[in-house]
Image (cartoon, rainbow, N blue to C red):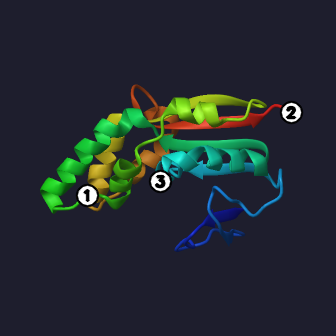
Amino acid sequence: MVTCDLVPPARFGPGEAFVRATGTRLPFSDRSFDAVVAVDVLEHVPPDLRGRLIAEATRVARERVFLACPCDGSARAEARHRRVLEALQGTANPWLVEHLERSLPREEDILRAVPPAWSVERIPNLNLAVWWTSRIAVDVAHRPLRVLGRLDGLLDFGRTYRTVFVLERGD
């Protein structure tokens, strides 16, 4: 597994390699990896570069790309979360502030950026109310709700916080 970012992770997984790079300019040959995974990344990329990140991910992937991010439909829940944190702590979660500054990705923009040879499956991920409650638990009480990780797809109902886009190469 290769992790690309501008800052190395605090901990490495077994066999994990780190490469300092942005997702918009990956230093790898075409089709270098079976799959590329970008979870909670697109919303931190400036809107004018998101299509470039998707192009790079599909360029270096042989078979699949997994993109997971909150889309613009989650903006109200994030705004409410920021207001609660600011009222309780005087500050908001810096990641959510960056989401506001950069704006959340729009699903139609993501789909438009996918090359024609690729198919897309869209999978809703993490019920919005559950996301909000879990973020309050982490950001206010500093208590992660570990049980949520064990519930697998049981929380992927109704309006969801995040959408997973599974791209599959068709050529």
Percent of width and height locating residue 146: 41, 53
Say which of marks 1 and 3 sits in front: 3
The image shows residue 44 at horizontal and vertical percentages of 47, 53
Residue 155 lies in quadrant: top left
- Mark 2 Cα-neighbour bin, 10 Å: few <14, some 14–19, many ≥20: few
52 relative to 161, above or below? below
Q: Which mark is residue 92?
A: 1
Spot occupied by residue 132 in the image (x, y as percentages of width and height): 31, 43
Of labels 1 and 3, earlier in sequence is 3
Does residue 89 sit above or below 75 in this rendering? below
Q: Earlier in the sequence, mark 3 or mark 2?
A: 3
**Vertically, is 34 above or below 167?**
below
Q: Is residue 168 above or below residue 11?
A: above
Q: Amino acid at mark 3?
A: His
The one nearer the camera, 27 or 153, is: 27
Q: Residue furthest left?
A: 87
Residue 171 — which label?
2
Name the foreground residue: 154 vs 93.
Answer: 93
Which residue sits at x=60%, y=50%?
Answer: 38
Which of the marked residues, 1 or 2, is nearer the chain's N terminus? 1
- Measured as percent of width and height from the top left, residue 120 is found at 67, 30
